[in-house]
Image: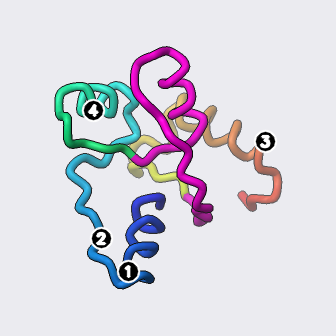
C-alpha cells in the first residue's frame, strides 16, 4: 500500500515513478539490501527508520507525506483455516478489532 501511494504521488506531479527493485516487509532484507548497494533507498515506516538510525545501522530522514493505509484482509489457504495457530491468530485479531464482523 505504501508503494502505491508513493507511486501516485509521483504520477500526480507528472514525474516518472521510481521502480521498486525489492518489495519486502523483512527488516533483515531491507538492511542487507541497503548495506550492499550504495544506490538503494528504502521507503518504510518512520518508527522503523528511526530505530535503525538509533542503532547506528543506517541513516534515516523523515519523509513527511501522509500515506493513508487501505483496509487490509487476512488471507489463508483453505486447508490451513482450521489449524489451531491460524484460529488463535484470527481470534486475537477479532478481539483487537471488535468492529470486524465474524
Q: Is residue 64 rendered magenta in the image?
A: yes
Q: Horizontally, is 24 left or right of 93 in the view?
A: left
- Point 81% across, 58% down: residue: 99
Q: Quadrant of residue 42?
A: top left
Q: Residue furthest top?
A: 55
Q: Indicate which disc, 1 or 4, sits on the residue closer to the N terminus.
A: 1
Q: Indicate which disc, 1 or 3, sits on the residue closer to the N terminus.
A: 1
Report how far apart the C-alphas of labels 1 and 4 lie in the structure. 26 Å
> Residue 67 placed where, x, y %?
58, 62
Out of 84 and 38, give the one closest to the viewer: 38
Q: Indicate which disc, 3 or 2, sits on the residue closer to the N terminus.
A: 2
Asked if the residue at tag 3 contacts the one at tag 1, i.e. Cβ–Cβ closer than 8 Å, the answer is no
- Point 23% across, 61% down: residue: 19
Q: Which residues are magenta?
A: 43-72
> Residue 35 placed where, x, y %?
25, 26
Q: Indicate which disc, 2 or 4, sits on the residue closer to the N terminus.
A: 2
Amino acid at each position: 500500500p505504501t508503494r502505491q501511494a508513493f507511486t501516485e504521488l509521483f504520477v500526480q506531479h507528472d514525474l516518472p515513478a521510481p521502480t521498486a527493485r525489492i518489495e519486502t516487509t523483512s527488516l533483515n532484507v531491507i538492511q542487507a539490501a541497503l548495506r550492499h548497494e550504495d544506490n538503494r533507498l528504502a521507503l518504510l515506516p518512520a518508527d522503523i527508520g528511526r530505530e535503525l538510525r538509533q542503532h547506528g545501522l543506517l541513516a534515516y530522514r523523515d519523509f513527511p507525506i501522509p500515506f493513508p493505509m487501505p483496509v487490509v484482509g487476512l488471507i489463508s489457504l483453505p486447508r490451513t483455516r482450521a489449524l489451531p495457530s491460524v484460529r488463535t491468530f484470527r481470534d486475537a485479531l477479532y478481539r483487537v478489532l471488535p468492529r470486524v464482523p465474524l
